[in-house]
């Protein structure tokens, strides 16, 4: 076991990512309009892995820092996902603490964002698109008062960086968000993120990890935080959690070719405290990061409310 470790990334000391199935393609040139969707089932699956379209909605969040030789480079510290309200407005969604975490005195003026096209680009040559989070003392992002979630309008620079052929972008819409039928105990999930413990050489492309939904609130799984059994670490914060295209259904039947849904975004991992269990106690001030193998996830349905809130604030 590892004791007394304190890993801080983008405002989180000892915290936590995948993308959904009908990630729509949206044209961004001229007046942005919806142009259909991409499904992971049957003949609609694009070439390559079923997860490729969803990776294209996932963003690495970081800062420009110095390496051990004093050279500037992009350092990943969190994850975000590109979403749309279905009315031609695009937002970057992530965990609120990535943008603002008073307990860690974290309130950056701006952050850098890299997308799927940057996987082949050196972090020393391309720092990503800069997104301003605060201006004249005012937050430019919209944060949830109940969940660890925040959204900020996507800039034209970012959308251009991640565009597909034909001036389109892969984006998640409300129809891609999981409902109560999809968010259930035992549901297979995948998580996308950039955990720091694997090292920067493996952070060019989002790391995918699998798990299951471990616990949901019986009063409403899409209105409360829920837990997943998956290995998530600092650097996964804000990462998407998706259902899988094959697995066990609520009625115990098994199906394939299911539509992938975005269940939520990673908030943090559950860390072991001094009193772990009866008869087991860590040293005072001890902490084992991710010892429980359980992550706290914020529900995707809350993002719909956040986008509406953001639009009303900008009017």
Image: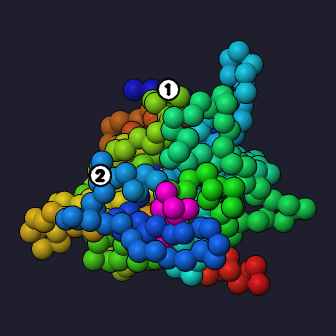
Answer few, some or many: residues within 10 Å of disc 2's Cα (few below 14, many 20 plus, some between 14 and 19).
Answer: few
The residue closer to the viewer here, 32 or 207, is 32
Q: Which residue is mark 2?
A: 47
Q: For this view, does 87 lie left or right of residue 182?
A: right
In this view, 287 is above or below 89: above
Q: What are the residue bounds of the magenta stretch?
A: 165-173
The residue closer to the viewer here, 119 or 239, is 119
Q: Which residue is mark 1?
A: 201
Q: Residue at x 46, y 30 (%)?
A: 202
Q: Position of residue 25 (x, y in %)?
A: 46, 67
Q: Secondary structure at mark 2?
A: loop
Q: Residue at x 51, y 61 (%)?
A: 166
Answer few, some or many: residues within 10 Å of disc 1's Cα (few below 14, many 20 plus, some between 14 and 19).
Answer: few
Q: Position of residue 143 (x, y in %)?
A: 66, 68
Q: For this view, does 45 lie left or right of residue 96?
A: left
Find out whether the residues at labels 1 and 2 contact each other: C-beta distance under 8 Å.
Answer: no
The residue positioned farthest toward the front in the image shown: 166
The residue positioned farthest toward the left in the image shown: 253
Q: Residue at x 62, y 32 (%)?
A: 123
Q: Tell me if residue 295 can be seen.
A: no
Q: Position of residue 76 (x, y in %)?
A: 59, 39
In reply to whether residue 149 is colored magenta, the answer given is no
Of mark 1 and mark 2, the one earlier in the sequence is: 2
Q: Secondary structure at mark 1?
A: helix
The residue positioned farthest toward the right in the image shown: 136
């Amino acid at each position: 076991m590892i004791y007394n470790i304190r890993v801080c990334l983008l405002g989180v000391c000892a915290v936590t990512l995948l993308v959904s199935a009908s990630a729509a393609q949206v044209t961004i040139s001229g007046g942005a309009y919806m142009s259909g969707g991409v499904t992971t089932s049957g003949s609609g699956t694009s070439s390559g892995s079923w997860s490729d379209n969803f990776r294209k909605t996932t963003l690495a969040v970081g800062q420009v820092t110095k390496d051990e030789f004093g050279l500037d480079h992009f350092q990943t510290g969190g994850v975000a996902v590109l979403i749309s309200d279905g009315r031609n407005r695009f937002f970057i969604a992530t965990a609120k603490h990535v943008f603002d975490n008073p307990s860690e005195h974290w309130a950056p003026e701006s952050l850098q964002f890299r997308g799927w096209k940057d996987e082949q680009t050196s972090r020393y040559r391309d720092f990503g698109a800069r997104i301003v989070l605060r201006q004249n003392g005012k937050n430019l992002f919209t944060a949830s008062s109940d969940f660890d979630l925040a959204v900020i309008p996507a800039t034209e620079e970012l959308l251009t960086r991640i565009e597909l052929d034909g001036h389109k972008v892969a984006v998640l819409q409300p129809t891609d968000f999981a409902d109560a039928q999809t968010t259930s105990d035992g549901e297979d999930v995948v998580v996308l993120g950039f955990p720091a413990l694997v090292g920067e050489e493996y952070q060019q492309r989002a790391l995918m990890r699998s798990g299951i939904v471990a616990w949901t609130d019986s009063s409403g799984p899409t209105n409360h935080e829920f837990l997943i059994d998956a290995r998530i670490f600092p650097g996964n914060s804000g990462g998407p959690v998706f259902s899988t295209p094959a697995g066990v259904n609520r009625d115990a039947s098994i199906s394939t070719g299911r539509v992938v849904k975005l269940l939520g975004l990673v908030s943090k991992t559950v860390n072991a405290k001094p009193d772990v269990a009866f008869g087991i106690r860590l040293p005072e001030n001890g902490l084992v990061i991710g010892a429980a193998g359980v992550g706290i996830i914020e529900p995707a349905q809350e993002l719909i409310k956040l986008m509406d809130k953001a639009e009303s604030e900008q009017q």
